[in-house]
């Protein structure tokens, strides 16, 4: 049984951390992770499941069945938990934002996240899928920004090769698209 536990508060209060309720999460490959309840709630999906399990009363978390997360493997869930623990400890719970609030979007990634996300391409895409499934917007954004920053540096041909994308355009169609989008290339050259 794998056990992972993180901080219970962003305040660093050791006494509070010692009594924080824990929740058990079960990966798709049946690995069990023990996580501080506030950390687990950084996932909106897990938070919803916890609220459904808790109902009106305060349950005994030790006796509840693990929360099944069938679409996430053990190794990926471990990485997701590491990310949640770090960000809960250092940032606190993510503030609620209206869907149309784009003020927090940039292409910058924190140094910690940049180090965290230095993984092979398969793991990166699994992290993006897991963060989407678990509804952890900030982690999904970090993953997508990483992919976008890689794509930004590649030509169309390099992207096709890297991601095994077949070119289904005829040479004439490609030329027409290039002419139609010349203004984009002019802007990129001026940067």
Image (spheres, helix red, strand yellow):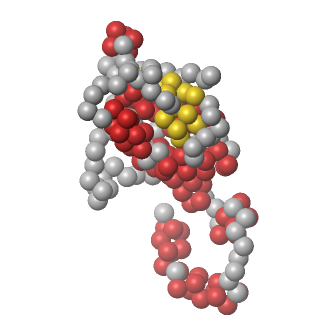
Residue at screen point 59% across, 88% down: 176
Residue at screen point 59% across, 82% down: 178
Query: Residue 122 location in percent, x, y?
Result: 67, 49
Residue at screen point 54% across, 46% down: 130
Residue 36 seen: no
Is 111 in front, or is 42?
Answer: 42
User: Is 184 rendered above or below residue 121?
Assistant: below
Query: Residue 185 location in percent, x, y?
Result: 53, 74
What is the tally of numbered marks visible in this picture?
0
Q: Is residue 104 left or right of residue 2?
A: left
The residue at the far top in this view is: 15
Query: Residue 55 location in percent, x, y?
Result: 30, 35
Quadrant where the N terminus sits is: top right
Is 129 in front, or is 191?
Answer: 129
Is 101 in front, or is 81?
Answer: 81
Residue at screen point 70% across, 87% down: 170
Query: Residue 151 location in percent, x, y?
Result: 59, 59
Is 56 in front, or is 83?
Answer: 56
User: Is 191 rendered above or below residue 58?
Assistant: below
Residue 183 seen: yes
User: Is 153 rendered above or below residue 175?
Assistant: above
Q: Is residue 10 left or right of residue 117?
A: left
């Amino acid at each position: 049984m794998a056990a992972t536990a993180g901080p219970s508060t962003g305040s660093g209060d050791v006494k509070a951390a010692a009594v924080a309720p824990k929740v058990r999460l079960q990966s798709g490959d049946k690995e069990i992770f023990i996580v501080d309840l506030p950390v687990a709630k950084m996932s909106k999906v897990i938070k919803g499941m916890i609220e459904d399990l808790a109902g009106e009363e305060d349950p005994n978390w030790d006796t509840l069945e693990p929360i099944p997360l069938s679409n996430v493997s053990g190794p990926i869930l471990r990485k997701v938990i590491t990310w949640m623990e770090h960000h809960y400890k250092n940032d606190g719970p993510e503030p609620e934002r209206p869907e149309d609030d784009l003020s927090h979007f940039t292409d910058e990634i924190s140094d910690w996240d940049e180090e965290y996300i230095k993984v092979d391409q398969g793991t990166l895409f699994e992290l993006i899928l897991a963060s989407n499934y678990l509804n952890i917007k900030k982690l999904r954004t970090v993953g997508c920004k990483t992919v976008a920053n890689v794509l930004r540096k590649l030509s169309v041909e390099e992207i096709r090769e890297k991601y095994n994308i077949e070119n289904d355009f005829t040479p004439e169609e490609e030329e027409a698209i290039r002419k139609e989008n010349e203004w984009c290339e002019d802007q990129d050259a001026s940067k």
